[in-house]
């Protein structure tokens, strides 16, 4: 059937152009034209084009920089990854970046890029480049945590070398059109590691003494320990004050948004240490 209003304007062309993003510290580039429609699926079964693992940090960083400025939908189409309803498929953005960059880790206990010892962390940011939420680091080994030193901890292993990738997270922009920001390779400075170690020591001591239920998100300067699981079915083993095993909600470590904001701000500054 015809339409008296003429050709319908493409959906992509009607959306607002977010020129303000260009002022963000990670320097998102503008879209390279195009547009079109992206079909969103409520759940995802990954069937994608394989990407070989990067052979060096330089190659990994080059791949990540080549994604900067592109919308998530375009990257998903390039690798034949169905678009997910992100509200129902938590972790979809991180998985998409892992696929497009050639991550190899099959276990959550290993860095995403095993050969390089690099962990990938995506960070949803606002128009000013500020993280909008805390960043998941890893699950907490409650049964053995009190016996682990900082040097042998999973937190230190995960944070030894991190590839930060900001992701535009403006609510008004549909997920397929949200852009990928400039990446940053980072390792904790000596001062940052001292504070992270202090946080780990305090939290692990409390867990080891059976006080896991008393730990709140207010404890820790950079590092938090918070519940990760909504009901009793996800319960894990921990220990009480007597050292006896108990069932408790699983916990995970998170970096505060304020700390990640400082990391990104320093890394993107003209004198930053990013490669």
Image: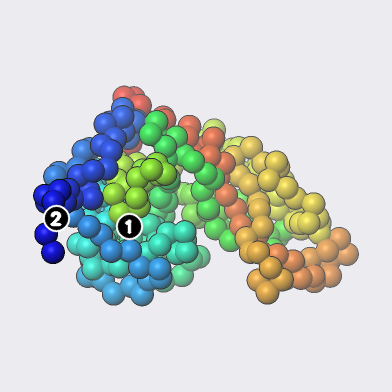
Q: CA distance from mark 1 to mark 2?
A: 41 Å
Of 259 and 161, which appears nearest the observer?
Answer: 259
SS class of the residue under badge 2?
loop
Which is more foreground, mark 1 or mark 2? 2
SS class of the residue under badge 1?
helix
Of 65 and 53, which appears nearest the observer?
Answer: 65
- Percent x, y of residue 191: 54, 33
The residue that appears at 71% across and 71% down in the rendered structure is 232
Does 216 sit left or right of 132 as displayed? right
The residue that appears at 69% across and 68% down in the rendered structure is 231
Residue that lies at the very extreme toward the front in this rendered image: 4
- Percent x, y of residue 154: 56, 58
**How many residues crowd mark 1 within 10 Å: few (<14), some (14–19), many (20+)?**
many
- Percent x, y of residue 176: 30, 54
Instruction: Determine whether 187 is above or below 119 in the image.
Output: above
Residue position marked by numbered label 1 in the rendering: 97
Does 126 sit left or right of 62 as displayed? right
**How many residues crowd mark 2 within 10 Å: few (<14), some (14–19), many (20+)?**
few
- Residues marked 1 and 2 touching at CB (< 8 Å): no
Residue that lies at the very extreme toward the right in this rendered image: 242
Q: Which mark is residue 3?
A: 2
The residue that appears at 29% across and 74% down in the rendered structure is 47
The reply to whether residue 36 is in sight is yes
Does 200 sit left or right of 56 as displayed? right
- Percent x, y of residue 84: 37, 64
Of 132 and 216, which appears nearest the observer?
Answer: 132
């Amino acid at each position: 059937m015809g339409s008296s209003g003429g050709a319908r304007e493409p959906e992509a062309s009607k959306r607002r152009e977010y020129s303000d993003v260009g002022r963000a510290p990670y320097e998102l580039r503008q879209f390279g034209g195009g547009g079109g429609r992206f079909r969103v699926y409520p759940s995802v079964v990954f069937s994608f084009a394989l990407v070989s693992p990067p052979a060096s940090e330089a190659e990994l960083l080059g791949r990540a920089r080549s994604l900067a400025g592109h919308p998530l939908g375009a990257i998903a189409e390039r690798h034949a990854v169905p678009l997910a309803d992100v509200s129902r498929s938590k972790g979809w953005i991180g998985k998409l970046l892992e696929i497009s960059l050639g991550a190899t880790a099959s276990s959550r206990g290993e860095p995403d890029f095993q050969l390089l010892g690099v962990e990938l962390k995506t960070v949803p940011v606002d128009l000013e480049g500020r993280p909008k939420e805390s960043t998941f680091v890893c699950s907490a080994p409650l049964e053995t945590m009190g016996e682990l030193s900082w040097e042998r901890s999973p937190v230190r292993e995960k944070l030894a070398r991190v590839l930060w990738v900001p992701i535009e997270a403006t609510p008004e922009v549909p997920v397929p059109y949200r852009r990928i920001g400039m990446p940053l390779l980072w390792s904790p400075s000596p001062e940052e590691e001292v504070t992270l170690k202090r946080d780990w020591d305090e939290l692990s001591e409390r867990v080891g003494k059976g006080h896991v239920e008393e730990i709140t998100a207010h404890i820790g300067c950079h590092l938090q320990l918070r519940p990760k699981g909504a009901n009793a079915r996800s319960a894990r083993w921990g220990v009480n004050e007597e050292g006896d095993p108990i069932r408790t909600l699983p916990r995970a470590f998170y970096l505060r948004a304020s700390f990640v904001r400082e990391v990104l701000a320093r890394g993107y500054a003209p004198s930053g240490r990013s490669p």
